[in-house]
Image (spheres, helix red, strand yellow):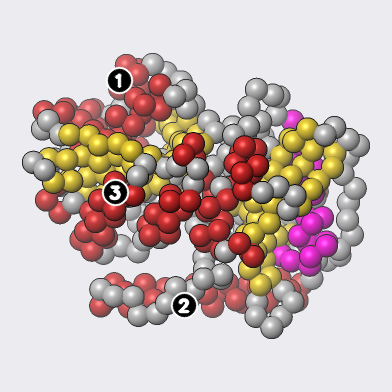
Amino acid sequence: MAHRRLRELASGYTSEVDAVDEQRWCQILDGFDDANIFHTWPYAIVTSGRRHISHLVLKEDGEIVAVAQARIAKLPFLNVGIAYVRWGPLWRRGGTENKADTFRQAVRALRNEFVCKRGLVLRLFPILFQDDPACFAEILAEEGYSALSKESQSRTILMDLAPSVQDLHEGMKSHWKRELKVAERNRLEVLEGSGDDLFSAFVEIYNEMVSRKKFVEPNDINQFRMIQTQLPPKLKMRIMLCRSGGDICSGLICSAIGKTAIYLFGATSNNGMKSRGSYLLQWKLIEKLKQESVAVYDLNGINPAKNPGTYKFKSDLAGVNGKDVYFQGRFDSHASLVSYMCVECSGRFRKLYQSLKELAKAARGINLWPKAASWRSQSSHGEGNH
């Protein structure tokens, strides 16, 4: 890996970089089953800024077969930096056979552009799980990528939505079904939409929950609120709220792009703990996802040791239709050991900075430092909370 030699793409394949605008990118995403919110243009703009994003399109015989959105961060005064591709590249097109060689050519084109041409460290977090065919890890190794073995592997629960609504209900754990019955007897009103008024109402109870539980937020809710204002209607996140006696008692935010829905945020207000509104909202969401032919519901992050309550909530919801999976993790490619070490040292400093900031925020209830913009953490697999 310590060289910058380009590898030719296989016959018939070509790649283009930064040749599409936002509108065209949105249209392209619509053609991929593995499309997700982390590959939307507004997500990159809000989290990194326009000057720090890049888009690669891979074609086979002139037809788009894979794409990737990279967020780029560079160290000040040094010609080193990192290109980060989260939950990508996208290569599973709807209605077509998914070929492993398409994945190979996509990761090769990414390395050619960001490592060989730009001299950056390239870090991929692909949508690959440990039980996926071994050929994908082999392809990454053969194409000049190495797994970050020292990192703890992220886990999630994937809920198969193929069974009927009745079977999905029967498949839930008995405890979850009992709690859902309680919620249904409470005659809660369900509100649904994508507007900022609903997002604002959700943020209010979300902040109550964060203060009550005193946990470190895995994702910045205010960033996602800003992303929502910029997403086109077809890609907007879904907001669902429960109201009891005129007050919002619980809420969730979900993103459904491609064939997979992702649970992003959940919250219950201080006064809504007994309403069981979070159970009703999850069930109503599943019913709607079924209607829209979404294939999989990703419950987005589990940690039984650190957050057993959230783990039980998600695990019991999925029940027999859930699959507890580990991601294969992140993969790095680089051409210069010096550049790689600079990036790694900067990353460790950034994590320390963020930890100190969160400790101060938890202790005093305020944010003492401004947010780090271009070098903020980009590695966590977010975890929904309720």
Cα separation, mark 2 vs mark 3, equals 33 Å
Question: What segment is highlighted magenta in the picture?
Answer: 99-121
Contact, mark 2 vs mark 3 (Cβ under 8 Å)? no
Farthest left residue?
245
Residue 251 coordinates in the image, percent (x, y): 27, 44
Lower sequence index among marks 3 and 1: 1
In this rendering, the label closer to the viewer, 2 or 3: 3
Total labels: the figure holds: 3
Q: Which residue is mark 3?
A: 197
Q: Which residue is mark 1?
A: 170
Q: Which residue is mark 2?
A: 353
Residue 301, which numbered label? Answer: none
Residue 148 coordinates in the image, percent (x, y): 63, 59
Under circle 1, the secondary element is: helix
Query: Measuring 88% from the left and 51% from the top, which residue is drawn there?
Result: 7
**Within the magenta stretch, is there residue 93?**
no
Cα separation, mark 3 vs mark 1, equals 35 Å
In the image shown, does 367 or 333 lie closer to the viewer?
367
User: Does 314 sit left or right of 115 as displayed?
Assistant: left
Farthest bottom residue?
77
Density class for disc 1 (Cα within 10 Å; few <14, some 14-19, many ≥20) is some
